[in-house]
Amino acid sequence: MKPSVIPGFGLTFGYTILYLSLIVLIPIAGLFLKAATTPIEQIIRIATSPRTLKALEVSFGSSLIAALVNVVFGIIVAWVLVRYKFPGRRLLDAIVDLPFALPTAVAGIALSTLYAPKGWVGSLFSDKGPLWQWWHGQTWLPFGLSEFSLNFKIAYTPTGIVIALIFIGLPFVVRTVQPVLEEFEQELEEAAATLGANRWQTITSVILPRLTPALLTGFALAFARAVGEYGSVIFIAGNLPNISEIAPVLIVIKLEEFDQAGAAVIAGIMLIIAFVMLLVINLIQAWARRRFGNV
Amino acid sequence: MKRTARILALGGLAVALAFTGAVTARAQDQTLLNVSYDPTRELYVQFNEAFAKHWKDTTGGNVTIEQSHGGSGKQAQAVIDGLQADVVTLALEGDINAIVDKSGLIDANWRSEFPNNSTPYTSTIVFLVRKGNPKAINDWGDLIKDGVEVITPNPKTSGGARWNYLAAWAYANKTFGGDEAKDIDFIKQLYAHVPVLDTGARGSTVTFAQKELGDVLLAWENEAFLVLDEFGADNFDVVYPPSSILAEPPVAIVDKNVEAHGTADLAKAYIEYLYSPEGQTLAAKNHYRPSDPSVVTDQALVEAFPKIDLISIDDPLFGGWKTAQPKHFGDGGIFDQVYTPAQ
């Protein structure tokens, strides 16, 4: 390997390895060591039990949905904050960071209070609530359709989990996309327009490809954060086994049984899945950077 | 200039003296950490104040009592992992046994160290319903009527919830004449009426009282009365079922820790004071059933507890915590089976 022209590689590299080991690698190694104290049959039994599989599905599934929703609406928020000048823009910009700062338990309690069947938002969608009333008041609907009971439970269902995860993940997408958008030369869009591209083509062929690497980063961050989330979700999920129980709750259950090894097994499984997914996202990102250029 | 310097020097001296004074005063002070579970907050705030006064009156020493509250199992784990508790006052015997087994910090014979199996106060599980009891919930069997929603925490994560479960089990056992398949079926139906499984007792209380979810909350007796105080007695009624469980939240000295801290006498006095007339009266005031009602200074408090049929965990039906815990709440136990979807 050719030494870099910048001095100090040895020192900074050594420091990096030490720092990463202390903060990240040693705790994770400890986790896997603990998990390894469990006999292999037991690991397989825990990993393949329907309840664990369902909890993993709920955790990763709702994190995926939440991250995708955040990508779509995160772009719009970032776009508005970067491209338009309006009174209160700075304030709005600051509000985006609030989910970072708020203790997640507070967020969970606030959200579940809002979305519970008797809460401000939840009551709109509850049985015989305003939405239901309105639907049944529509005389133009063909018979049968108006009988369709229009009520949704939000809190204490998987939908509630997704809402909590959207809340905590929003800043990641906005904050990764925003600086890239700010660096955009608007001339490129003007050039596209003069070359005859309509607005849709400008968005899909000029803007989005160059946003892709940043979007993927934001998506990966929001997704990873959502997978590990516990504090806000337990208040809104309902925690019903096989329905709205997330994998971190299973870990806590294992700990309550004083079964640290069992908890470590589930944590290890989550970590491996998350690591593989993040690795794939990173590979796609590397590909996107080559394909669309580094912005 | 000279004057400023002198003022500074004097000031510095004063500060230094104040420090020395504080340090010497601190040296006679002792601190005691009581690691407890969630619903005992209000009780121990009052009890600690009373004990600190009692300790000052009898020994002349100052004592600062620190409290830690959380889920009972989590608190036990924290002590095992090194939380420097002097005494533990937890929801379940099983949690103190876990400290004994996993860390050896507590002597194995802790249950015989204090009267009444080291249980200074007992409690039971009652129903908290909406005002006027619109769904007419009066016994455990009413919980599985159509359209009734029951709020109770997850027995896997909450000590209180285990008592709820066991009380329901005892009812089923009595009703179905000991047919265990029917008992399991009753428990299955009961949990099918539970829309939310909070992780702790306080979480369930908030779900029921504040978010107005469900028709009945299965609650500690003291927690039910706390809701009446906090959320208004005109919104809720406490219903006593004809039978329930005798919940015995035990206490213990963490022997190895008090040895290291030199607080053995203090910790012993602290727990003994729980059994004193003052301690028993404070427990009764906070809706815990005193283990020695005769010493309570205000007998009206004792008479306020309705007399219902209470079954103990040591009854042959359960066979003590060491048998009941793995059978019902262990990995793959009956509670897990109840939630295993039909294949």
Image: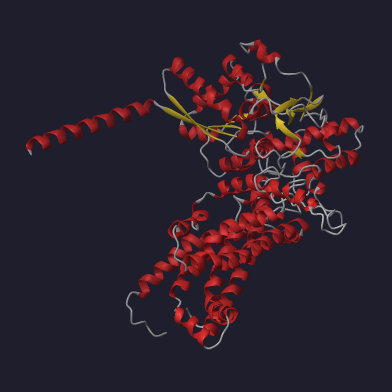
Q: Is residue B291 above or below residue B340?
A: above
> x and y percent of residue A208 in the render?
56, 77
| Residue A237 percent coordinates (x, y) | 68, 50
Looking at the image, the residue that sits furthest to the front is A140
* Residue A48 at x, y percent in the picture: 76, 61
Give above or below for B309 relative to A69.
Answer: above
Observer-nearest residue: B102 or A170? A170
Q: By what rule are the colours in the image chosen? A: secondary structure
For this rendering, which residue is in front, A250 or B199? B199
Q: Is residue B102 above or below residue B209?
A: below
- Taking the spot 70% from the left edge, 16% from the top edge, the residue there is B304
Number of numbered discs overlaid on the protein picture: 0
Name above or below for residue B315 compared with residue B331. Answer: above
Q: Residue at x 52, y 40 (%)?
A: B83
| Rendered location of residue A199, percent (x, y) | 57, 79
Q: Is residue A137 visible?
A: yes
Screen quadrant of the N terminus of chain A: bottom left
Q: Quadrant of the rendered structure where residue B2 is?
A: top left
